[in-house]
Structures are given as structure tokens and as C-alpha cells.
Amino acid sequence: MQAILAKCQYIVKGIYETFDASHDFAHIERVRKNAEEILKTEPSANAGKVMLAVLLHDIDDAKYKSDANPSAKEILQSLGVEAELTNQVLACIESVSFSGGNAKNITSIEGSIVRDADRLDAIGAIGIARTFAFGGARGRKLYDADEHTRENMSEEEYRSKNTASVTHFYEKLLLLKDLMVTNEGKRIAEERHTFMCAFLEQLDREIGMNC
């Protein structure tokens, strides 16, 4: 498995480095670190499966997917990963996306770990940095006092509007703490969530937006 993981990393690193700073290979490395921490508390999980899913989890992201790049499935097949494991890894990946609160059901402990590890990188100090990095790359406003937080969205509705970066906190990031699955993910999320709330309170004081 280590040889497969090394080859997989070599392939995906070049792809992720074409993405903006919110989803580059440094993001993958942080998610991997988060997954390693959660794995320490989930001894029944298959670490190899988790790490393959971590490496590949943003390859097919609709925000970045390109016909010039191979899909996650194609990468796994090129690495000679057997069909059963390929399907299990893809199932883990499919359950990661938030999709406006319309995430697919988790079917394994490995999927729970990968989802929590990725969502932990969306909150806290790094989550704040990533939100504004992504917003800057997409030409989004920092904040918009006239913009209302949307609720009960379909995936299409969630992705269709180029909302201000601060609005994204209320439509997704502040919801993630209560959506964590693993005990360790929940524990880590508490501190990061508190930090985000403090940031938004300070932002409100500075701009008087009543965020």
C-alpha cells in the first residue's frame, strides 16, 4: 500500500498545484494530518483506504475538474488498485462534499474519517484563510450587508450563487461543528468553531455589519 500511496501522491500533487490556494496540495497535507489524528482513535479503520481517499478527494470536485486531468477512478485504475478497493475509496470520496447540506450518506468508518478530516480544514483559522483565498480567486466580495443567508438549499442552488465570503460562514462553515461524525473530529471542531465565532464578532465590530 505504501508504494501505491507514494505513486498516487506523485500524480495528484501536480494536479492540485494547478488549483487555487484554498484547494492546493497543502490542503491535502493538512487533511491527511487531520485524518492521522482521527485514525489514532479509530483502530478498526483501514488507514490505507483513508489515505487514498484523502489524496484523491478533490480530484473530481466540480469547481476544479478538467478534462485535461484524470478522474479519481482513472488514477486508481492506473495504480492497479483492485476494483473492490477502488469502489470503496470512491464511496468515501462521494460522502465528503457538503453540497449545501445535501451530502451523501456515509457508508463506512473510513468515509467518516475522511469527511471529518476535510471539514476540519474548512473551519478555524485555516478555514478563515481558505474562505477568503477561494473568494479572492473567484472574485467574490469580502462581505455584503444586503445579502441574506440561504437555508434548505438544493445542491444546484448552493453552487449557483457567487455569495460574499462572509456569507459562506453562515451557509456552511458555522454548521460543520454539529455535522462531525467521529468523536475526535467533534473534539477538534469545538475549538476551531469557537475561533471562527470570535473572528466574526471582531469583524462585526470593525465593519459594523452585524454579521
Image (cartoon, grey):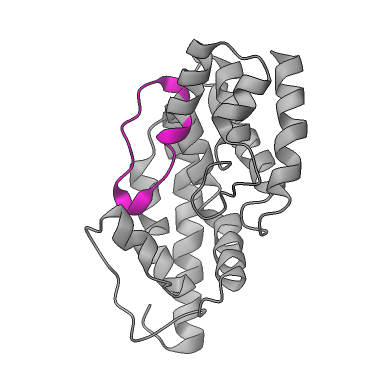
Q: Is residue 169 left or right of residue 39?
A: left
From the image, which quarter does the C terminus lie in?
bottom left
- Residue positioned 42% across, 29% down in the render: 112
Please tell me which residue is depicted at 60% across the width and 39% down the height of the picture. 31
Which quadrant of the figure contains the N terminus?
top right
Q: Camera-side residue: 63 or 126?
A: 63
The outermost residue toward the bottom is 208
Q: Which residues are magenta?
A: 93-110
Q: Would you say residue 96 is visible in this rendering?
A: yes
Is 57 located above or below residue 44 in the figure?
below
Q: Nearer the viewer, residue 207 or 118?
A: 118
Quadrant in which residue 138 is drawn: bottom right
Q: From what the image shows, is residue 61 above or below residue 94?
A: below
Q: Is residue 102 left or right of residue 66?
A: left
Image location of residue 95, percent across then percent down = 40, 35
Task: Indicate left or right for 5 with 160 as reference.
Answer: right
Query: Could you say where residue 149 lies in the image, as x and y percent from the top left?
Result: 30, 71
Predominant SS of the magenta segment:
loop
| Image location (x, y in percent) of residue 108 | 39, 20
What residue appears at the point 57 percent right and 10 percent down from the top-left corner?
82
Q: Is residue 36 visible?
A: no
